[in-house]
Image (cartoon, rainbow, N blue to C red):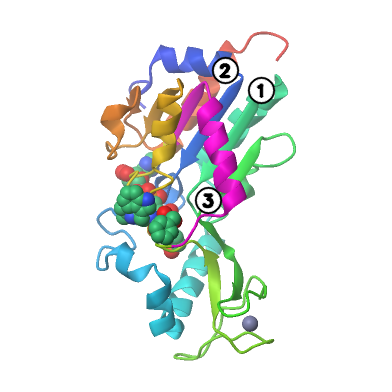
Amino acid sequence: MNAIPFTEELVARLAGARRVAVLTGAGISAESGVPTFREPGGIWERFRPEELANVDAFLANPALVQAWYAHRRAVVEEAAPNAGHLALAELARVVVARGGSFVLATQNVDGLHERAGSGAADAGTLLELHGSLRRTYCADCGADAGAGALDALAAGAVARCAACDGPLRPDVVWFGEELPAEAFRAATRAAQTAEVYLSVGTSAAVYPAAGLPLLARDCGAYVAEVNPRRSDIADELDEHVAAPAGVALPALQDRVRERAPAGW
Ligand code: BJW
Ligand code: ZN
């Protein structure tokens, strides 16, 4: 890397912060080989997400949507957490070890933050705002159908509930659906109380998650975005770190650790 892409102010604020919160999006998993949504080559280059990721599209063609999510799950299982995921887990350990709080809210459904160690007992809180590809449930009766229920279906076949024969769906949040209430409440509280807030790898195009960095700013946090491109909300934040998460976050984490007072 030629130059450090973030300011000394961000390093100093993170090193001194007792409450740190983060929002991540698909961009943090890009370097793990998981496609993003809205970029060239992204998952939805050919479809508008608002039209595909909703319950009506699923009910109209459950076999197609199930096959699509089984494919996505296979991609994610082949992928591994990258340096950006690992740096956030490490930064959480640093903040928690000195008695602070660290809340990571992710819009991602790929499970890579958990696999990187975020949310473990010593590594802060992990909140999955848009669900997870690792869970499925019955669209009719709500029964839990286990992790691999959508895998290995014959073409055109629909995976159905053992209890009521309803179609099984991934436990993800589609457009028009509520986010998991407790997770979103906790993410909101974290944004309201954070001293430093990082928005990483998200286009900030999808609400209510995109409102969290803005809420944090309104409540007094220093808010930095980590994204090679400027998101829809970049102009309203304190700092734009123009670098991939897998480059910027490990460098940031190193600098914060260096500056940490003895005894942390
Ligand atoms: C890198 C990088 C690298 C690349 N390093 N960065 C207020 C105003 C207007 C509309 C609404 C509103 N409030 C609610 C709405 C409606 C709607 C909405 O937001 N619509 C917008 C399109 C305007 N929201 C909802 O419906 C939500 N529910 C809700 O509000 O409930 C209340 C309600 C109920 C009923 C009626 C009304 C209200 C639910 C939203 C659910 C979103 N679901 C999806 C699919 C999940 C399942 C799946 O994965 O298939 O979630 S959509 C998709 O977008 C997915 C993502 O989590 C989400 C966000 O995308 P993300 O992560 O930002 O990815 P990208 O691709 O957009 O951006 C990647 C970024 O990474 C880019 O910026 C790159 O530059 C960057 N990058 N490489 C760092 N190496
Ligand atoms: Zn059922």
Task: Return the residue at label 1.
Answer: 100
Q: Position of residue 66 (x, y in %)?
A: 48, 78
Residue type highlighted by circle 2: Ala
Where 183 sits versus 65, above or below?
Answer: above
Q: Choose mark 2 or mark 3, whichever is in front.
A: 3
At a point 58% along the width and 51% down the height, the residue shown is 181
Residue 240 as seen in the image, left or right of residue 31: left
Residue 123, visible in the rendered structure: yes
Indicate if the residue with disc 3 has its beta carbon within 8 Å of ligand 1: yes
The residue segment tinted magenta is: 177-199
Indicate the secondary structure of the residue bearing disc 3.
loop
Callout 1: few (<14), some (14-19), or many (20+) C-alpha neighbours within 10 Å?
some
Residue 36, visible in the rendered structure: no
Indicate the secondary structure of the residue bearing disc 2.
loop
First in residue order: circle 1 vs circle 3: 1
Residue 54 as seen in the image, left or right of residue 194: left
Task: Return the residue at label 3.
Answer: 129
At a point 66% along the width and 29% down the height, the residue shown is 93
Query: Could you tell me if the residues under marks 2 and 3 are in contact, i.e. CB atoms within 8 Å?
Result: no
